[in-house]
Amino acid sequence: HALSGHAKVKPFDPKITCKQECLITTFQDVYFVSESFEDAKEKMRESTKTIKRPFGVKYNPYTRSIQILKDTKS
């Protein structure tokens, strides 16, 4: 189906892709493509930097864990 010409093929953009309805009972209407896996990964990383969250996080390499830096709920 993806290569048949029935579906639209668009460049991968996380901000657009996340708004696309995901069909579970039929084939997808739109497929998003990227130049490479590295390109898609970089676009995802840049996109996630814009997500607002009520806390900050930091990776601690010594404990191999994520630390919450700020919690605005408390």
Image (cartoon, rainbow, N blue to C red):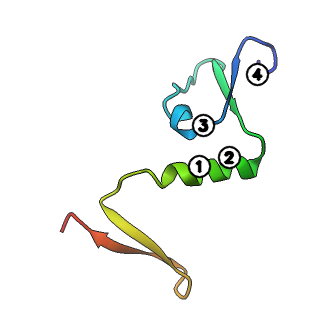
Q: Residue beneath label 3, please?
A: 13
Question: Observer-nearest residue: 59 or 35?
Answer: 35
Who comes first in sequence, dot 3 or dot 2?
Answer: 3
Alpha carbon separation for disc pair 4 and 1: 23 Å
Q: Kindly identify the residue that appears in the image at 37 percent across and 67 percent down.
A: 56
Mark 1 in CB contact with mark 2 (< 8 angstroms) = yes
Q: Position of residue 13 (x, y in %)?
A: 60, 37
- Three-letter code, disc 1: Met
Who comes first in sequence, dot 4 or dot 2?
Answer: 4
Q: Is residue 31 above or below residue 45?
A: above
- Among all residues in the image, which is located at the extreme left? 74
- Three-letter code, disc 2: Ala
Q: Kindly identify the residue that appears in the image at 73 percent across and 39 percent down.
A: 34
Question: Observer-nearest residue: 13 or 59?
Answer: 13
Q: Residue beneath label 4, please?
A: 2
Instruction: Say which element carries label 2.
Output: helix
Alpha carbon separation for disc pair 1 and 2: 6 Å
Who comes first in sequence, dot 1 or dot 3?
Answer: 3
Q: Count how many numbered circles sit on residues in the image.
A: 4
Left or right, 3 with reference to 34: right
Instruction: Say which element carries label 4.
Output: loop
Q: Kindly identify the residue that appears in the image at 65 percent across and 35 percent down.
A: 12
Alpha carbon separation for disc pair 3 and 2: 8 Å
**Labels 4, 1: front one:** 1
Alpha carbon separation for disc pair 1 and 3: 8 Å
Q: Residue beneath label 1, please?
A: 44
Instruction: Say which element carries label 3.
Output: loop
- Three-letter code, disc 3: Asp
Q: Kindly identify the residue that appears in the image at 52 percent across and 48 percent down.
A: 47
Q: Residue beneath label 2, please?
A: 40
- Among all residues in the image, which is located at the extreme bottom? 62
